[in-house]
Amino acid sequence: MSKRTCAACDYELDDNAIQVKVGGQVVEVCCDECAVKLKEAYASATASQQR
């Protein structure tokens, strides 16, 4: 059985995982702080590609 880990920090997820939609995909993170970091990183990456 494989472990589920946070998409932002690789922390092992438990039943309190948060699902966020980023780039059209739903990913799981361990906390609100990681959710914000992941959304900011995605926004920054896509903004630099649109230049």
Image: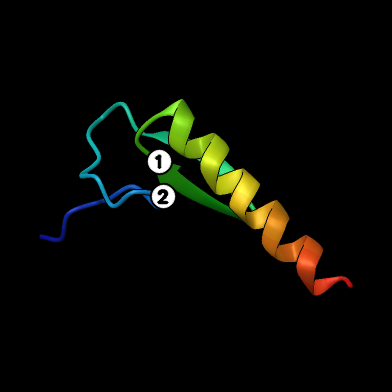
From this viewpoint, which residue is outermost toward the left?
A: 1
Q: Position of residue 36 (x, y in %)?
A: 56, 36
Q: What residue is rendered at 60% in x and 53% in y?
A: 41
* Above/below status of 30 relative to 38: above
The residue to which callout 2 is attached is: 8
Does residue 17 lie above or below 50 as drawn? above
Q: Which quadrant of the view contains residue 51?
A: bottom right
Q: Within 10 angstroms of label 1, few (less than 14), some, or many (20 or more) residues?
A: many
Q: CA distance from mark 1 to mark 2?
A: 7 Å
Which residue reaches farthest right? 51
Question: Which residue is found at the position 34% from the left and 47% from the top?
Answer: 6
Q: Is residue 10 visible?
A: yes
As drawn, is 21 to the left or to the right of 46?
left
Instruction: Tell me the crowding category of disc 2: few under 14, some 14 to 19, or many 20 or more residues within 10 angstroms, Cα based.
Output: some
Along the line of sight, which residue is nearer the eye, 16 or 31?
31
Task: First in sequence, mark 1 or 2: give its number.
Answer: 2
Decide if residue 40 is on the left or right side of residue 51: left
Please name the residue that numbered disc 1 is placed on: 29
Q: From the image, which quarter does the N terminus lie in?
A: bottom left
Residue at 41% of width from left, 50% of height from top? 8
Label tally: 2
Name the spot of residue 10 as percent of width and height, x first.
28, 52
